[in-house]
Image: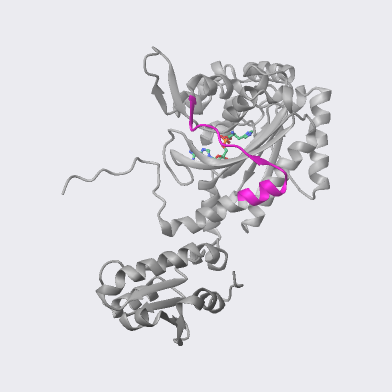
Amino acid sequence: MGPKIPRPRGTRDLLPEDLPRVRLLEDTARRVAERAGFGEVRTPLFEDVRLFARTLGEASDVVEKEMFAVPRRGEAGGAWAFRPEGTAGAARAYVEAGLAQRAPFQKWWYCGPMFRYERPQKGRERQFVQFGAEVFGSACPEVDAELADLVLTFFEELGLSGLELRVNTMGDPHDRRAWGDALRAHFSGRLDGRCSDCRTRFERNVFRLLDCKVESCVDANVGAPTLDQYLGAEARAHFEGFLAALAALGREPVRDPGIVRGLDYYTRTVFEVHDPGLGARSALCGGGRYDRLVEELGGPPTPASGFAVGFTPTEAALEARGLPTAAVLEPYRALQRPEVYVVAITDEDRSAALALTRELRRAGLRADLDLKGRRPKGQFKEASRRGARLAATLGPEERAAGEVVLKDLESGEEVRVPRSTLLDRVRRLLGAPPA
Ligand code: HAM
C-alpha cells in the first residue's frame, strides 16, 4: 500500500450522499434566478491575474493574501489566477462579447467554484461555491432592490429565517475621496492600538480599517467619520430610492455604515445578508453596485450591480436550524434509488439480465443489477439495501417463456408478465403515467 495523499486543506470531497443537499442549493438558485429573468453564464475558472488585481484592488485581502496564482509559461512575470469571485470575470466577458454596444442591458446569474487562499475555518474554505447574479446596463436603484430581494427569496425558499439584510452606500467617487481624507485625518495618530493589517491598510486603503474584524480595532472605529457627512445629493437620492424600493417589497433592511465591502469596485449601494447566529463570519451574501467596473475593463461607461452568496456559510446556517428536512431532500435521494432492480437466477441469465436492465434504462427508468455474481438471495438483499421499488427476476424458465417475474418490494406481491407488456406494467406499479 502506498502512502495516502490527503486532499488539500480547505477543500471538500462531495460524495453521492452529500449531493442531495448540494443539488437542492443549486436548483433553488437556478429556479429563483430564472424566474426573475436572469440568464446563466459560465466564465473560465482561471483568468489573467491582472483582471483581479485591477478590479478587486491591490490592497484587498483577496488580492494581497488569498490569490491562487499560477505562472504563465513563457511569459516572465505573467500569471493566471484561479478566480476568487465571479464579478470581475462576468464584467470582462460582458466587455469581450461587445454587449455594451449590442445589447447593453443584461441580467446574468452563475453558480460555481471560487478559490481563495484563506485560513480554513467554519464557513470559510479555499474552494467554495458562489451563487451570484449581475445586472449590467441600468443605474436604477430598483435594480439593487430587485437583487437584494432575489437573494432573500433564495434564502427563504431554503427555509432560512431570521436573516438580516444590512445596507449601506459607498457614495460617488468624489464623496468617497472627501470621506477618505476625513478618515485619514481621524486615524492618523490613532493607529497605535490597531492590528498590523490596519496599519498597512491605513496607507493603502483607509476604508478597510472600518472592515477589520479584530475586536480592539472594531472598538477603535467608534466615532470615526461616516460617509453620511460627505454624501452628495445624487448618491443620497439613489440610496433613498433603493430603500423605498425595498420598502415596497416589504423588506426591512438594517442600515449599517460598517458595510464597506472588502473589494474595491463598489460605488453607491452595498449590502450583505447576515445570519446573526453565525458570529463574526456571519455574511452569507455580499453585493452592491459597481458602476465603474465595465469602464475600467475597457468598455464604455456602464452601470452595474450584483451579489454573490457563499454556499459554505449558507450550509452552516441551514445546519444550525436542522435544515434541510428529510422531506425536502427526499426527491433528490429518490434519484439515487433504482426503480427496478434486475435479478438473474443463474449465471447463464446474467447477460439477459444486463440486456433487460439496459432496455429499462432506455425507457427512461432507473434500473440496476448485480454484476458481482451474487446468488439470487444476495441480489434481493442488495435490491432492498439500495431501496429499489421493484425487482424483475429472470431465470431459465422466464427466458424460455419470454416472461419476467415482477415483485413489488414494498408489498411483496409478485406477478409474471410477458416481456412485451413489461414496461407498461412497471410504469403502472411505479404509479407513473404510461409512455
Ligand atoms: P464577497 O463578499 O467577497 O463578494 O463574497 C460573497 C460571499 O461569498 C460571502 O458573503 C461569503 O458567503 C462567500 N465567501 C467568500 N469567501 C469565502 C470562503 N473563503 N469560503 C466560503 N465562502 C466564502 C463577492 O465575491 C462579490 N463578487 C459579490 C458581488 C457580486 N458583488 C457584486 N456582484
Q: Which colour scheme is used?
A: one colour
Looking at the picture, how far across and down is residue 149, in whole percent? Answer: 72, 46
Using the rendered image of the protein, determine whether residue 126 is visible from the camera's viewpoint. Answer: yes
In the image, is residue 397 above or below residue 165? below
Q: In which quarter of the image is ligand 1?
A: top right
In the image, is residue 111 above or below residue 417? above
Number of disc labels: 0
In the image, is residue 298 above or below residue 288? above
Residue lying at the far top in this picture: please name it.
76
Q: Which of 383 and 214 is in front in this view?
A: 383
Q: Give the range drawn in magenta.
A: 29-47
Judge left or right: residue 148 versus residue 351.
right
Residue for point 61% across, 72% down: 433
Judge left or right: residue 221 versus residue 112.
right
Is 379 a magenta residue? no
Looking at the picture, how far across and down is residue 342, in whole percent? Answer: 38, 73
Looking at the picture, how far across and down is residue 168, in whole percent? Answer: 71, 34
Judge left or right: residue 348 versus residue 361.
left
Q: Quadrant of the C terminus?
A: bottom right
Residue for point 79% across, 26% down: 235
Residue lying at the far left in this picture: please name it.
1
Residue for point 31% across, 80% down: 396
Using the rendered image of the protein, determine whether residue 162 is visible from the camera's viewpoint. Answer: no
Looking at the picture, how far across and down is residue 108, in whole percent? Answer: 66, 37
The answer to which image quadrant residue 354 occupies is: bottom left
Is 36 a magenta residue? yes
